[in-house]
Amino acid sequence: MKKTFELSHPKIAYPRLIEATKSEIKKYLKRERNKALPEYADFWGFDCKFGQTEEQADVIHVAEINDKISFAESQAWPTFYLEILAAPTQRTKREVVDEENEDDL
């Protein structure tokens, strides 16, 4: 999904437009997560960008999307750009910290 969301409408209030965009994004993420995964993948990862325009968009984590939209609402942006690209991903093992070495710190 690469989309510029318009947050102005003659009949729909601004807060309702914000909620509608959040709902649309939530539905998109659910649809993408329900797609069949390739054999080598464990889950769907998402590469996301958010900004006032496509040129100003910064890379964000998928969990930050609602916070960024709320920020745009607080700043009363007339539009914002959101890019969400699904990619099959494998889990990586976390680095285990040795407890004995932790005491030395």
Image (cartoon, rainbow, N blue to C red):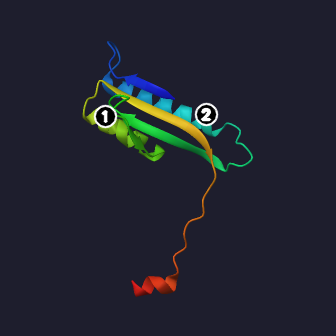
Residue 18 lies, in percent from the top left, at 37, 29
Q: Where residue 77 sits: x, y (%)?
A: 28, 28
Instruction: Specify whether 59 is left or right of 96.
Output: left
Near mark 2 (Cα within 10 A), the count class, few <14, some 14-19 or many ≥20, is: few
Spatial CA span between label 1 and label 2? 25 Å
Residue that appears at 31% across and 34% down: 72
- Tell whether 78 sits left or right of 33: left
Q: Which of marks 1 and 2 is nearer the N terminus?
A: 2
Quick check: 63 left or right of 37? Answer: left
Numbered disc 1: secondary structure: helix
Please report the residue visible at 41 percent of the width from the left and 87 percent of the height from the top.
104
Is residue 94 shown above or below 33? below
Disc 1 marks a residue whose amino acid type is: Ala
Q: In which quarter of the image is residue 74?
A: top left
Q: What element carries label 2?
A: helix
Q: Toward the viewer: 8 or 1?
A: 1
Residue that label 2 marks:
31
Which kind of residue does numbered mark 2 sit on?
Arg
Residue 4 location in percent, x, y? 40, 24
Image quadrant in which you'd find residue 21: top left
Q: Residue 72 carries which label?
A: 1
Extreme-top residue of the structure: 10
The correct choice, above or below, for 23 with respect to 38 in the image is: above
